[in-house]
Image (tube, helix red, strand yellow):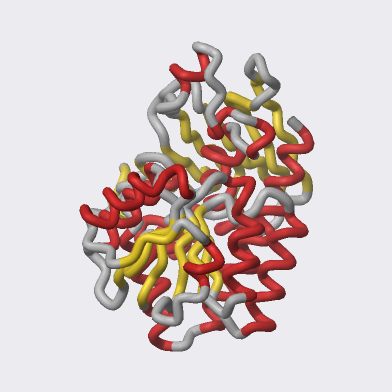
């Protein structure tokens, strides 16, 4: 799969670095804004990318590209993905998939109509840790409580404290803790238990109204799920699922859990380890495999999950 990469930020650099580990995929072009051409050329040189575009439309006209990877600010995901699908390109879009739920529904519908792959790039669903948690979930009996915590100080927080509001802390650009951090907890929990009966978001806000941290409480039949996220403070991260017969605990943030264990009363027993936790290689391998095998069914199933998460994310943001 020949990919055109759109953007030049930190996540793009991570994608390009991890793409080296993925067979069957290569970055053949990079598209940046005109003012960022020098950065684009530097990335092209560093990762042996043959073409640099500063016009997105021109990039989409490149017949040698099978797909595009969208790694730009959240607020522009919908427009860029839609243009790519209309141009007949498969799309890998960084999380959050979109800003509003209707955008996600429209893009999913368009991808199906065009017969194209559309993937939201979130690592959780493709992690061996997450898959193992799903496989062992029934062993702990009826679930009674779920707790997820992903808290880390943002690399942009120092700028924010000094009055420089970058996209990660800009509500006008769909920044904030819910879109950036707690979204992973949402993906994890919804991936295991589906749509909750109710959702409430209790946010701590910064001086410009952005949610800098907060707690989501989701009500399910018989239990509550409490999802904690923070961009302005750090603590040990992980998820705990408590059942009547025991518990399952994951180590590390939901986006990059390194291991999982189960305890049924006789002490913790390891059930999963992910040597690639934190990289984008696993999800990209899954995308390439679906592409090579023509597995649209798996892709569209995950699209339904992404749409559901966007509906819940939208509800949470409106509640903050």
Q: Picture coordinates of residue 247 (x, y %)?
A: 45, 45
Judged left or right of residue 103, residue 129 is left
Which residue is depicted at the point 33% across and 49% down?
A: 13
Q: Residue 2 falls in which quadrant of the image?
A: bottom left
Above or below, comparing residue 320 to residue 315 in the picture: above
Q: Picture coordinates of residue 229 (x, y %)?
A: 54, 32
* Residue 255 visible within the image: yes
In the picture, the quarter occupied by the C terminus is: top right
Judged left or right of residue 47, residue 205 is right
Which residue is depicted at the point 47% across and 19% down?
A: 159
Above or below, comparing residue 245 to residue 81 in the picture: above
Q: Picture coordinates of residue 146 (x, y %)?
A: 56, 42
Q: Residue 208 falls in which quadrant of the image?
A: top right
Which residue is depicted at the point 36% across and 78% down?
A: 1
Q: Nearer the viewer, residue 132 or 84?
A: 84
Above or below, comparing residue 146 to residue 162 in the picture: below
Total marks placed? 0
Q: Nearer the viewer, residue 227 or 182?
A: 182
* Residue that extends furthest to the top in the rendered view of this protein: 162
Which residue is depicted at the point 58% across and 26% down?
A: 213
Q: Picture coordinates of residue 74 (x, y %)?
A: 59, 46
Q: Nearer the viewer, residue 7 or 189?
A: 7
Q: Nearer the viewer, residue 151 or 225?
A: 151
Judged left or right of residue 97, residue 30 is left
* Residue 260 visible within the image: no
């Amino acid at each position: 799969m020949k990919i055109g990469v759109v953007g030049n930020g930190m996540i793009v650099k991570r994608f390009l670095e991890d793409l080296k580990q993925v067979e069957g995929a290569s970055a053949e072009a990079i598209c940046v804004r005109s003012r960022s051409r020098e950065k684009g050329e530097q990335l092209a040189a560093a990762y042996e990318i043959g073409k640099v575009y500063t016009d997105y439309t021109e990039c989409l006209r490149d017949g040698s590209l099978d797909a595009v990877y969208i790694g730009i600010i959240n607020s522009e995901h919908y427009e860029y993905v839609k243009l790519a699908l209309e141009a007949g390109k498969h799309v890998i879009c960084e999380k959050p998939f979109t800003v509003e739920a209707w955008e996600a529904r429209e893009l999913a519908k368009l991808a199906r109509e065009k017969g194209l792959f559309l993937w939201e790039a979130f690592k959780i669903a493709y992690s061996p840790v997450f898959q193992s948690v799903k496989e062992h979930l029934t062993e702990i009996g009826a679930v009674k409580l779920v707790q997820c915590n992903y808290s880390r100080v943002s690399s942009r927080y120092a700028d924010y404290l000094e009055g420089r509001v970058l996209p990660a802390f800009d509500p006008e650009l769909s920044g904030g803790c819910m879109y950036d951090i707690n979204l992973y907890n949402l993906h994890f929990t919804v991936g295991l238990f589906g749509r909750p009966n109710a959702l409430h978001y209790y946010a701590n806000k910064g001086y410009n109204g952005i949610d800098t941290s907060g707690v989501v409480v989701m009500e399910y039949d018989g239990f509550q799920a409490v999802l904690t996220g923070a961009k302005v403070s750090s603590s040990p991260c992980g998820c705990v699922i408590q059942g009547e017969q025991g518990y399952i605990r994951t180590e590390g943030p939901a986006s990059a859990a390194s291991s999982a264990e189960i305890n049924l009363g006789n002490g913790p027993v390891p059930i999963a380890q992910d040597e690639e936790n934190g990289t984008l290689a696993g999800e990209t391998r899954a995308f390439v495999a679906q592409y090579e095998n023509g597995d649209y069914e798996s892709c569209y199933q995950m699209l339904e999950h992404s749409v559901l998460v966007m509906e819940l994310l939208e509800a949470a943001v409106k509640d903050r």
